[in-house]
Amino acid sequence: MKKIVIFMLTLSVFVLGACSLKPPEWAKPEKKDDLKDIKLGLSVSTLNNPFFVSLKDGVIKEAKQKGMDVVVVDAQNDSAKQINDVEDLLQQGVDALLINPTDSAAISTAVQSANNIGVPVITLDRSADKGDVEALVASDNVRGGEMAGEYIVKQLGEGAKVAELEGVPGASATRERGKGFHNIADDQLEVVAKQTANFDRTKGLSVMENLLQGTPEIQAVFAHNDEMALGALQAINSSGKDIMVIGFDGNDDAIKSIEAGKLTATVAQQPALIGELAVQAAGDVLQGKKVKEKIDVPLKLVTKE
């Protein structure tokens, strides 16, 4: 009986440790004197988006310069797959995890798994709601949303009727870009329609087609990313309407569309730089150096002018 009680107490301590948001003392990252032969795990929300392809390329380029290896996995915008991918990366013995979450809440369990075995986590572009993350490398999404709202007010005046295409529900970028936009729009614009298109170009097209039928008075569209913006633009062009469209990210297709006088504007990020800075942060953490909890990457509003 005594052995059973001891076993149950030991099991309880282990379970409580596993549920902790902070890693136990025995699971602190081992300090690395040399970054060569370090293995990084990179989990990307989707590689079916040019923005995240650039982010991945930035990670690989910087890691190669430092002599690090990178194992890349694509969650395909599936939060359950991403959790499994991260668990697989941990099984492969990665020294640090770089995660671009599909869903900021769902990824928390995977972050905690890494915490419990002492593998440091850096998040890119989007945050994790729970768990111990060494650094978030991202643009100021709230400010970016404000920039889009301010531009619409400047171009169309107060009271203009706008539609908002939202990103993946649960993603921190969706919440933050929407919050920034509404900081301006709720006082100075009239949001007549709002619907998710999951950061996807094809969904942006279909959602915009429906919105144009139901709310023909739309004067401008703010999309939480360029892929949705380009899909919305295609629907607008097919309808023959003249509607301003502002995206977010600054991917190559969006910049080309702006230069051609089609897409109105985009709040441009620097995805390759996000990737580079994330690798640098991971290297610093592995060498026992302090890093900022939030590493900001500058934004720029890109228009044809």
Image: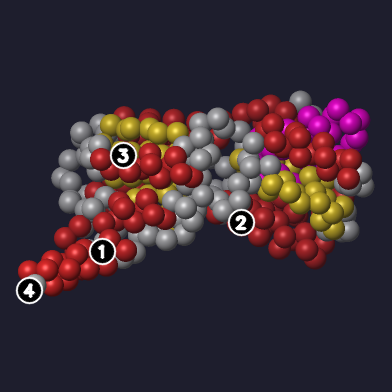
- Residue 234 lies in the magenta stretch: yes
Give me the C-alpha separation between circle 2 and circle 4. Answer: 52 Å
* Image height of 30 relative to 47, above or below: below
Boundaries of the magenta span:
222-245
Residue at left 71%, top 63%? 183
Along the horizontal axis of the image, is 215 left or right of 121? right
Which one is earlier in the sequence, the residue at label 2 or at label 4?
A: 4
Between label 2 and label 4, give the one nearer the viewer.
Answer: 4
Which one is earlier in the sequence, the residue at label 2 or at label 3?
A: 3
Give me the C-alpha separation between circle 3 and circle 1. Answer: 22 Å
User: Which labelled disc corresponds to residue 175?
Assistant: 2
Residue type at mark 4 is Lys
User: Which labelled disc corresponds to residue 15?
Assistant: 1
Which one is earlier in the sequence, the residue at label 1 or at label 4?
A: 4
The single residue placed furthest to the front in the displayed view is 1
Residue type at mark 1 is Val
User: Quadrant where the C terminus lies?
Assistant: top right
Which one is earlier in the sequence, the residue at label 3 or at label 1?
A: 1
Which one is earlier in the sequence, the residue at label 1 or at label 2?
A: 1
Q: Which residue is mark 4?
A: 2
Q: Are marks 3 and 1 in contact (CB under 8 Å)?
A: no
Residue type at mark 2 is Arg
Q: Are marks 4 and 3 in contact (CB under 8 Å)?
A: no
